[in-house]
Amino acid sequence: MPDFSYVARSSDGNLTKGTVTANDRGAALRQIEQLKVTPIKIEQLAAAASAKGGKAAASSASKSGNGSSTPAIPTRVDSMPLAQLFLFTEQLAHILGAGMTLDEALGILVRRLKQPKLQSISQSLHQSLVDGRSLSLAMRDYPKIFTSLYVNMVAAGEASGSLPQILKRLVLYITDVKSLRDRVQQALVYPAVLVVAGVGLIIIFITVMVPQLTGFFKDTGQKLPAATQLLVDANHAIVAYWWVAVAGAFGVFALWKAFVRAPEGRKTWDRFMWNLPAFSRVPRFRFYAQFSRTIGTLLENGVTLLKALELLEDISGNEWIRLQMVEVRKAVVDGASLSNALRQHKLFPELLLDMMSVGEQTGRFSDTMQMIADVYERELDKQVKFVSTLIPPLIIVVIAAIVGSVVYGILSAVFNLTSGLQGKMH
């Protein structure tokens, strides 16, 4: 049987080298994985020797030719759409699951992925791997792409020797997060279109139609009715002082940005938004579902509860909630159960906390949290459907009221003109 040399990363993050004897490369890879290390590179010893000779020859030819060649430096990538992160994670999981080493998998991704950002990030991670860094450590250089949660799950996979399985679970997690976000965004598209169309219609009525119609009425010399005069004044204000409204809007926006930029201001604003009646239901249910799904996924992959809570502090995007989660984590450190710690801060509904408590008592906490996530994702769907059904009629009523007021003002002038003409005829 042939011998295979390998380079792998152990659970403590150090590189280890060795040789194994196996029938083929796949059997060698399975032997290495049984050692609870993450294989980075594996080569058959005879093939490795010939490859080194080929590289030396190529290097000699390169030096005798046009000069030394340097590898292309990957372009820095600071952001990536969630869909592309999903593709990267899915492809890497499939390649590792097919029996490739991490070094080979990233090299394949550099050639396979056509999107510039995906190619660049794959090349950068591959180069870091060649330089001796772990995959999770290399990913920490891109915090806007790979979140702390993502990186820590990868680190857990490297430590346990189960990186392909961890990546597959990350694929499922990203799918759930993306599906959740897409459902909310799609539900708000129609109301947003109605708002834009309604505002445009109102502006056209007041700035185009009203001046044309009221200009004729003024030529008659008759006094305009109060409703029509109000339209004329509104038209004059919009045409002559539109810049005041724009400047005022920018001023209010700047003051708001300055307010929320301060830590205390951000906490106050986020607390107000979290407790806003009716409008906070969708973000609340979204947070409940995402919190439950994330903590269940982390615990399933060997992350401790305290570490999971630390990673979950930023998941809501709400500073007030983040500070509450910091206090929850401190309570858990002091010995409280998670359900009791959360109950003290009244962040979650009683039903969720009761289900969480049952999971803690039965020893099936991660499975229970996944079940809770399913429950609140269904509730979120109901809330999104309710909001998306309720908003369009409200917008239509508001637009109809404004347009109706404009039409009433115009018709009032018409009736007034008709009455005046009839009086003159008599």
Image: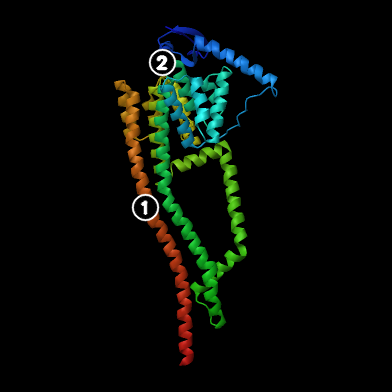
The residue that mark 1 highlights is 390
In the image: residue 216, left or right of residue 388: right
Query: Counting residues from the N terminus, which is met first, the one under dot 1 or under dot 2?
Result: 2
Residue 114 in picture, x, y percent from top left: 52, 35
Residue 160 in picture, x, y percent from top left: 43, 16
Q: Residues within 10 Å of mark 2 (few under 14, many from 20)?
A: few
Q: Quadrant of residue 289?
A: top left
Please state which of residues 191 and 283 is positioned toward the viewer in this rendering.
191
Q: CA distance from mark 1 to mark 2?
A: 58 Å
Please state which of residues 325 and 154 is positioned toward the viewer in this rendering.
154
Q: Residue at x 65, y 24 (%)?
A: 70
Residue 267 in picture, x, y percent from top left: 52, 37
The residue that mark 2 highlights is 26
Height in image: 198 above or below 136? below
Circle nearer the viewer, 1 or 2: 2
In the image: residue 41, left or right of residue 387: right
Height in image: 102 above or below 225? above
